[in-house]
Image (cartoon, rainbow, N blue to C red):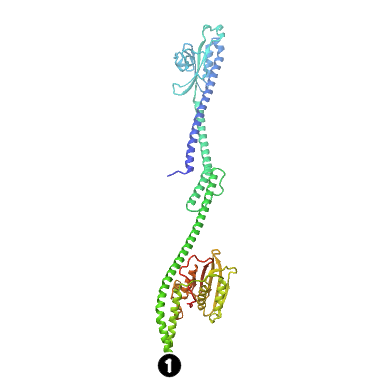
Amino acid sequence: MQLKLLTKFTVVTSAAVLAAMIIFALINIRSLKNIFLEEAVKDVDNLSETLIRTTHYQMLENDRERVRQMIQEVGTQKGIEHIRLINKDGVIIFSTDHVEIGEVINKNAEACNMCHGKEVPLLQTSSMNRSRIFKDRTGKEVLGIARGIYTDPSCLVAECHFHGPDDKLLGVLDVIVSLEDMNSKMIGHRNGIIILTFALLLLLLTSLAALTQRVINRPVGKLLANTRRLATGNLESRIENPSGDELGELAQSFNVMAKNLRNAQKELREWGGALEARVEDRTREIRDMQKQLIQSEKMAALGEMSAGIAHEINNPLTGILMFGSIIAGDPRLDPGIKPDVDTILQETRRCGAIVQGLLEFSRNSVSHKREVSINHLLDKTLSLLEHQTLFFNIRILRLYHPALPDVMVDPNQIEQVLMNIILNAAQAMPEGGDLILKTDLREPGSLVHLEIRDTGCGIPAENLEKIFNPFFTTKGVRGTGLGLSVSYGIIDSHGGRINVDSEVGNGTTFIISLPLSPPARDARGDVGASGPAV
């Protein structure tokens, strides 16, 4: 299991601080022990000096008993184990421990280190060099100080006159004291230092943990949480109130990064939406172009076929019509069958009209284009139609562009298109309605846009794809199904587009777009004279 940042930092810091505190405590305890030991040595050495000076007069008087009494009295003080006098030959001449009186001390013993620590005996040495720590017979740790008793000029004239003038060291006063009090104090101070060390360590670690939690762990936790939210796609995630230190700079950098990512995502979405819209527009344009191309190819093929059929049918129809007319005018004709002959003539003329429409549909005549106003062509077409009874209940609304430029077209052919569509609109409103004519400029200023909208019955969706097909009609025997096909061919030959939008019950809108400049090509030529409406 991975440790958290706070745990790692606390463990490492605790280890470093603990090691430093332990080293500090050991050095402090050792220094304190040395200080206590120096003080003990100093006290014992002062005691030895005091004994030597106190007994100096009795020694000059050779009052040995008094000297022994004084040493015995001092030896009864608390902490003093025993005091002994050693002559220059190493014989213990007096001791508060009477058992060792008369013993001979080895020169290598602790009491002789003041003079015999080196090859050459020393007359003077420091108190620390004269001290030794050892365990007595009972196993108790004690401190011993050996102090030399040197020849004084007054000794030469004293009553004892025991020593010669060349003797420098007369003997050694060896004072041994117990170290139990010092060790007890040392243990107390050591325990106090240990407790204080651990208390300081606990306080320091608690402070470090709280400081780390506030200064490091909490900002890092916020940064981590916001980074996770950012990774899940929440680009609105921000770190509030960043501090002024390096972690605060990191938080500000995170906020800037998140803002830039959000802006980049927004731009990508906008670009994606724009690209999708462009793809849809281009796809729609390609689909329309493909439909127009298919329609053009279909109409071209049907035009060739229609021309052949029309020529083949036209001659027999002419014969039928001629002989039918002769029969109808023959006085020998039975009046009872004359209505039948009239019906034959009527239907023959209707077939002739269909053949004539086929010829017009397939004819490639030379167009006569010139610059004209679409608004003027609309008004001219309406002047020919609006007085018919079909338009009595229809309200005509003209929404013309006031500054519409002229277009290069064949006015007769465009007038034929307008007449076909307007008649179809009027026939779709037998009970009356609105006929709206609107002109405008599109893309920008390169196309003249014309809308012819009615409020009639509308065209079913299944018929919208068929209305430009030759011979498709919903009018029965009253229509040939060629009007819109001819109109499609005329607009296509002018380099324009014709589309239809319709909804059953809400009317139909025909949309015609014509370029301002003449088309670069003539796909199938212009369709000639006026034909019947669908």
Tell me residue 294's x, y (percent): 43, 68
Please state which of residues 404 and 126 is positioned toward the viewer in this rendering.
Answer: 404
Identify the residue position indicated by label 1 in the image.
Answer: 331
Crowd tier of the residue under label 1, counting other residues whose Cα lies within 10 Å: few below 14, some 14–19, many 20 or above = few
Q: Is residue 245 above or below residue 271?
A: above
| Residue beneath the point at 55% across and 10% down | 152
Q: Is residue 309 visible?
A: yes
Q: x, y percentage for residue 300?
A: 43, 70
Q: Is residue 156 above or below residue 304?
A: above
Residue 299 drawn above or below residue 333: above
Q: Position of residue 472 (x, y in %)?
A: 44, 75
* Most foreground residue, 352 or 266: 352
Q: Amino acid at mark 1?
A: Pro
Is 453 on the left or on the right of 470, as rendered?
right
> Residue at the right extreme?
402
Quarter occupied by residue 336: bottom left
**In this orientation, does residue 481 appear?**
no
